[in-house]
């Protein structure tokens, strides 16, 4: 049973109590023995974790960039709504479990392998341009940022990646170069 109480100095503590009846030789309750322990710190940690998770969910939901998480083999384990929109998929199930290399144009696969190694070695990579593939096979220019997610032992366990469509920017840069020539 969880209960709370005020301490003499006015702090609220939460404690967990286990109560066991004391029975006499006729199985009649003769008393109760209880053990309580302070779980205030654990409860605060749980609240902090819930707040942190809500912050993460809100951040992913409001970011304009596509957010994707993969395992170390590149298999997609999480996608944001923006990821679906960017690659023109309708349902999460179409991408979850798929390999992230399926979203990168074949001509950029070797580049992607090199940047995976760099991400593992350095922890992050930023502003790497790739040619990506939409569901229908059309290409678009994208800018990728990636970071390693580590487990509680400090070992890499996943990658988190954001991708931004920069096709319009690339076309504008090309038009400017052509105009200058």
Image (spheres, grey):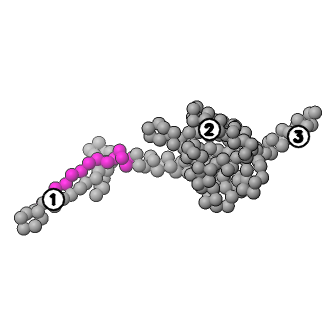
Task: Please tell me in which quadrant of the rendered image residue 107 appears.
Answer: top right
Mark 2 vs mark 1: which is more N-terminal? Answer: 1
Residues 59 and 94: in front is: 94
Residue 43 at x, y percent in the picture: 37, 49
Q: Position of residue 137 (x, y in %)?
A: 75, 54
Q: Which residue is mark 3?
A: 175
- Residue under the point 77% across and 49% down: 139
Q: Which residue is mark 2?
A: 116
**What residue is drawn where x is 73% and y is 53%?**
134
What are the residue bounds of the magenta stretch?
31-44
Q: Is 154 displayed left or right of 15 in the figure?
A: right
Residue 76 position in % (x across, y down): 59, 51
Q: Residues within 10 Å of mark 1 (few under 14, many from 20)?
A: few
Measured as percent of width and height from the top left, residue 125 is found at 63, 35
Q: Secondary structure at mark 3?
A: helix
Does the image show residue 59? Answer: no
Viewer-proximal residue among 99 and 96: 99
Disc with the residue nearer the chain's start (3 vs 2): 2
Name the quadrant of the C terminus: top right
Q: Is residue 110 magenta?
A: no
Q: Secondary structure at mark 1?
A: strand
Q: Nearer the viewer, mark 3 or mark 1?
A: 3
Residue 119, picture quadrant: top right
Residue 18 showing in the rendered view: yes
Please name the residue shown 69% across and 49% down the image: 103
Residue situated furthest top in the rendering: 122
Closer to us: 10 or 119: 119
- Other residues around mark 3 within 10 Å, as few (<14) / some (14–19) / many (≥20): few
Cα gap from disc 3 to disc 1, whole angstroms = 84 Å
The residue positioned 35% from the left and 44% from the top of the image is 41
Which disc, if any, is residue 32?
Answer: 1
Dot 2: what SS?
helix
């Amino acid at each position: 049973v969880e209960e709370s109480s005020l301490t003499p100095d006015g702090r609220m503590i939460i404690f967990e109590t286990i109560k066991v009846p004391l029975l006499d030789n006729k199985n009649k309750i003769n008393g109760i023995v209880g053990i309580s322990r302070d779980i205030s710190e654990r409860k605060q940690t749980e609240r902090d974790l819930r707040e942190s998770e809500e912050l993460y969910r809100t951040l992913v939901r409001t970011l304009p960039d596509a957010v994707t998480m993969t395992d170390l083999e590149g298999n997609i384990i999480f996608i944001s709504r923006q990821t679906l929109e960017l690659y023109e998929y309708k349902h999460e199930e179409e991408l979850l479990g798929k390999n992230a290399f399926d979203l990168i144009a074949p001509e950029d696969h070797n580049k992607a392998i090199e940047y995976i190694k760099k991400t593992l070695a350095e922890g992050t990579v930023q502003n790497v341009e790739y040619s990506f593939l939409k569901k229908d096979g059309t290409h678009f220019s994208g800018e990728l940022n990636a970071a390693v997610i580590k487990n509680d032992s400090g070992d890499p366990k996943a990658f988190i990646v954001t991708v931004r469509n920069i096709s319009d920017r690339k076309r504008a840069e090309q038009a400017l170069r052509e105009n200058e020539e």
